[in-house]
Amino acid sequence: MSKLELVASAISSMINVPVKTYDECLAKGWKKIPPEQFLDIGRIHESSLNRYGDNLSSKFPNNNNDDDDLYFPIIVNNNNSPSRIIVRRISQPFQIFVNPLSGGSHTMLVYPHTTVLELKYAIKRELGYDIRPLRLVFADKQLDDNKTLSSYNIRKGNTVQILFRAYGGFNFYVIKKDFLSPKYDYDFSNLIDDGKIHTRGKELYKRPYGWNRIALNVGKYGYDEKWLGSSGKSDEWPVSYHGTRKDFVDSIADKGYLLKKGKRFKYGKGIYSTPDIDIAEEYATEFKSTSGVVYKVVFQNRVNPKGMVKIEDCDYWVVPDERDIRPYGLCIKKV
């Protein structure tokens, strides 16, 4: 298979939407493809980088009551009387199943008043899916984000189907040869660490030994020494890696809070990556090529040192603004 076909398979696994090459489309007679159906690096960046702290979520009470209903207190303040506590009753959570077309069944704990949008965010947290192309279907009906599960009569044990649609209503995305920058490719697959020190932006650059680095076209950012240099100067952006599986960001968030004496380190919202590809590999997305070979893939990025926060005692970096992290390569290797 060609390099572009390999990249198409990798990106499809990252954004959970089918990706085809332009040559494949032409071979099938699909000549009129709208411009918005073509993928660029910006859209992939937006679709697949894991963020922490900006998800919508339902804050349900944590109650061990064994009755059919749960109870939780609400403090009510009146101008003419002291504060008092009243008790409200809500329904007990129940279990449903969600099934993606790719196979498998996953259980989710929901409430009757859970909205479809809240369920989508729960699926995003559990399975790592981007919610924008996500469609949920029950009883042959596509579910409206603003409606509750009870309005569709979804009950314990029911199954909701997960479907995907590319942004703009397309069933797939397309990439051309100019999506890649072959002259910047570097195959580290058969290289081993010789102990030589490499730096980018005054940070240690841990080269991706054992991986094939396929360069992406970063023309939208501009090819300049200010961020993409290789001399180790201060105006360069250092190198990091990013696994796109959902539990990558969850694990980083958990470890980031585990500091000395159990104190929480409040480093806020942001996009997480690591300068160590061995750490990123633990959260690499796996995919199968058209020839049946299974691979792993992670992003190779440059991170703006001015916006970067290093998590204490952990080999992770966080940037609050997505403009401060730029993927410029895909690191791929056989499982």
Image (cartoon, helix red, strand yellow):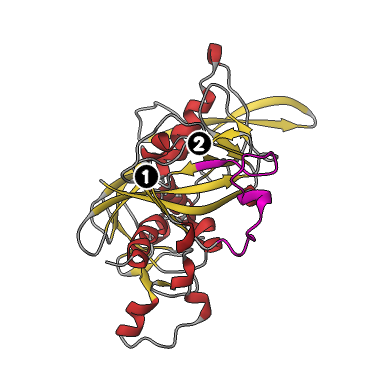
**Residue at x 58% of width, y 23% of height:** 312
**Residue at x 80% of width, y 29% of height:** 80
What's drawn in magenta, residue-wise?
A: 218-240
Q: Depth check: 90 or 322 in front? A: 322
| Comes first in the chain, label 1 or label 2 | 2
Q: Looking at the picture, which amino acid does disc 1 mark?
A: Ala
**Residue at x 80% of width, y 32% of height:** 79
Q: Secondary structure at mark 1?
A: loop
The question of residue 198 being in magenta is answered with no
Q: Looking at the picture, which amino acid does disc 2 mark?
A: Pro
* Residue 121 coordinates in the image, percent (x, y): 47, 50
Q: Depth check: 135 or 139 in front? A: 135
Q: Depth check: 95 or 193 in front? A: 193
- Along the horizontal axis of the image, is 322 left or right of 246? right
Quadrant where the N terminus sits is: bottom left
- Along the horizontal axis of the image, is 97 left or right of 175? left
Q: Are marks 1 and 2 in contact (CB under 8 Å)?
A: no
Q: Which residue is mark 1?
A: 284
Vertical comparison of 129 with 201: above or below: below
The disc at residue 275 is 2
